[in-house]
Amino acid sequence: MKKIIFLLIAGLTFSVSHSQDVSDAVRYAQDNLTGTARFRAMSGAFGAVGGDLSSISVNPAGSAIFNNNQVGITLSNQSISNDSNYFGSNTTDDKNSFILNQAGGVFVFNSRNPNTKWSKVTIGASYENTNNFNNRIFSSGMNPTNSISSYFTTYANGIPLGDITGIDYRDMLFDEQQAYLGYYGFVINPVADTDNNTQYTSNTTSGGRYFQQNEIYSSGYNSKLSFNIGTSYDDRFYFGANLNVHVTDYRRTTSFYETNGNTLGADETVHNVRFNNDLYTYGNGFSFQLGAIAKITDSFRLGLAYESNTWYELYDELSQSLYSTRQASGGQSMNASVNPDLVNVYEPYTLQTPGKVTFSGAYIFGKSGLISIDYSIKDYGNTKYKPTNDLGFRSVNNTISNDLTANGELRVGAEYKIKQLSLRGGYRYEGSPYKDKTTIGDLTSYSAGLGYNFGGTKVDLAYSYSDRKSNQGFFATGFTQAPSIQSTLNNVSLTLLFEL
């Protein structure tokens, strides 16, 4: 009881309904290419190669390729640039960040029994930052058709005015809270000023001149801690398994601003609006992986790996505020501030992201180098919010099934050794998770790097470049205007490895 009272004093409120959408599901279902510098330099094409700390994240049998104990750490600098085009207006924003990208180790235990073909067992643990959410996007332009008011009218229509004015904000469902913000911010008006009114109209003048800006600031990460076991049979067949613990910590602040550029009328209409949203999502998840690698010949290897669904338990906290100025022609401007000073703390929910199958092949040129190819398949349409019998989750799950699709990811990598020096390069292509191919487009990436073997110590350096287009709306409901975003990611990674 004391805890509940404290939370209310602190301005927190519990709510039973939140509007998760498809973009939230995709965010946690997608993984960026991370890992050691050697892994990144070869675009992650390690499913049949093994012998690298990050290869275990693709195919857990890769640990059984190791001949010696190894530990390592990788640091990365990530720079992302976003070029936005919104109704012909171009803007650019970028974000630079340093991260601990990877750390881990593998320990090899060779068999002392000469009568068995099971030659060794390996045990490993690895941490990877699978997705860095640090990002900034700024969009600005003159919208000739739609106002932010359409967002609030979409939520408000069907809700009795008496519920908006007579229910405490902390007891409202998400759609009722959006109607509350729009009504008390004077962005929307009821058709009739009665408690049983359920229809609302925009309080912006018509004419189609709305100057709009949208700022998105995000931070946080998805990380994966993997516990690995591997073994080899007859030095030709390698098997492995991972148990993975996933942690997510994501913060996003959005600020949407609109100025009504149309001629003011005799009645008070909204002249400008600022709508702020602060979302904090955190939680953890679990998955497992199984993999095998076979030496078809001494030079040619094939690999097969399966990664299960990831089952997340997530928590959301959301705070919203709205500020507006309304004015009639020749009249004084009037300000409105709708800031309940509350944080909606929602009940935990489960998100099941899709599994993945990876097929791999590699050709090893003795000690001079290698070339490898990985192809992975993931069906984003199998992403689900749970419990699936929840009416809200049932609706968004149907949308996920309709909007998302299975996609393929191709990774090609090569390495050439000149004594202690290694030269590396790679190519990666990942298809869009969306059926329309435009909400989030295809990804193309190139990488290169080098490494030097000092004996018991290795140093690797990698550079990777990727670009992707997207057209995601500022809001998922009502006002769905979308800028065209060209995102370019540059990454430099440095790995230090020690053989023990």
Image (tube, rainbow, N blue to C red):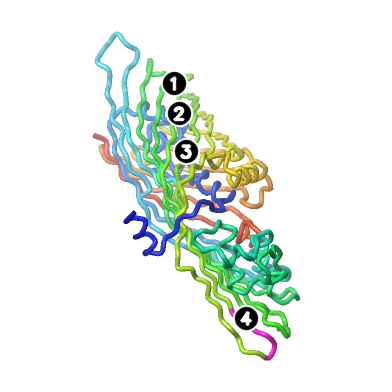
Distance from the alpha carbon under mark 4 to that under mark 3: 47 Å
Q: Residue at x 65, y 66 (%)?
A: 195
Residue with the mark numbered 3:
311
Q: Is residue 145 left or right of residue 423?
A: right
The answer to whether 235 is drawn above or below residue 429 in the figure is: above
Residue with the mark numbered 2:
364
The region drawn magenta spans 325-330
**Residue 137 counted in the magenta span:** no
Locate residue 3, reporting x and y percent. Answer: 33, 55
Residue with the mark numbered 4:
326
Distance from the alpha carbon under mark 1 to that under mark 4: 77 Å
Q: Pointer 2 and pointer 4: residues touching (CB < 8 Å)?
A: no
Give the residue type that dot 3 points to: Trp
Q: Earlier in the sequence, mark 2 or mark 1?
A: 1
Helix, strand or loop at mark 3:
strand
Distance from the alpha carbon under mark 2 to that under mark 4: 71 Å
